[in-house]
Amino acid sequence: LERTFSIIKPDATARNLTGAINAMIEAAGLRIVAQKRVKMTREQAETFYAVHKERPFFGELVDFMISGPVVVQVLEGEGAIAKYREVMGATNPENAAEGTIRKAHAQSVGENSVHGSDAPETAAVEIAQFFAGNEIV
Ligand code: ATP
Ligand code: MG
């Protein structure tokens, strides 16, 4: 089974949506095999989003990700990476399909409620940034 890394972002934890989002994840057939609520440090957020360092929204993105608690998760299932991106919906909620997390809950292209890994290599790196092997069960 494949694993992907998920973050329930500060806009969603602030609105008490962790349970609602987890219900959508589980309804899609993905299993939450690791989960914790953390407040990221600036350094953790900069490392996590290093691929976006040169983008104009990088500073805003890091400020947002450390503005409140997040829930970091590992999700497991068949084709988990692609499946979770389907459940999340498009980055910009205006373009997100009906029934997706971002359509239901995201507030803007920046404050878009969830993150999901985009490839097996990034999933492995992202999972290892937040979880030890024995925390994933
Ligand atoms: P994520 O990586 O969080 O799962 P994604 O893969 O759909 O989302 P990316 O292009 O990787 O989108 O962008 C990473 C994150 O940066 C987005 O989820 C969003 O929070 C933020 N972001 C992307 N584009 C913009 C933008 N134009 N303005 C502000 N923030 C943005
Ligand atoms: Mg991305």
Image (cartoon, rainbow, N blue to C red):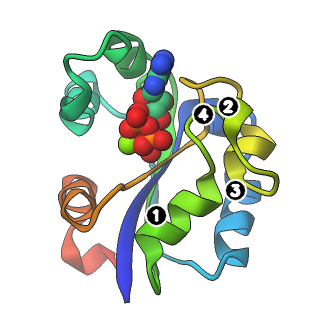
Ligand 2 placement by image quarter: top left
Q: Amino acid at mark 1?
A: Gln
- Near mark 3 (Cα within 10 A), the count class, few <14, some 14-19 or many ≥20, is many
Q: Nearer the viewer, mark 1 or mark 3?
A: 3
Say which label, 2 or 3, has the lower sequence index.
2
**Disc 2 target residue:** 14
Label 2, label 4: how many angstroms apart (C-alpha)?
A: 12 Å
- Near mark 1 (Cα within 10 A), the count class, few <14, some 14-19 or many ≥20, is some
Q: Amino acid at mark 3?
A: Ile
Q: Secondary structure at mark 3?
A: helix
In the image, what residue occupies the spot 61% across and 39% down?
A: 113
Label at residue 21? 3
Q: Secondary structure at mark 4?
A: loop
Say which label, 3 or 4, has the lower sequence index.
3
Label 2, label 3: how many angstroms apart (C-alpha)?
A: 13 Å
Q: Secondary structure at mark 2?
A: helix
Label at residue 52? none
Q: Secondary structure at mark 1?
A: strand
**Disc 1 target residue:** 35
> Is there CB contact under 8 Å for labels 1 and 3?
no
Q: Is residue 62 visible?
A: yes
Q: Quadrant of residue 61?
A: top left
Label 3, label 4: how many angstroms apart (C-alpha)?
A: 12 Å
Q: Quadrant of residue 23?
A: bottom right
Is residue 29 positioned above or below 97 on the image? below
In the image, what residue occupies the spot 52% across and 27% down?
A: 68
Is residue 111 positioned above or below 127 on the image? above
Say which label, 1 or 2, has the lower sequence index.
2
- Near mark 2 (Cα within 10 A), the count class, few <14, some 14-19 or many ≥20, is few
In the image, what residue occupies the spot 36% across and 55% down?
A: 117
| Mark 4: C-beta under 8 Å from nearest atom of ligand 1 | yes
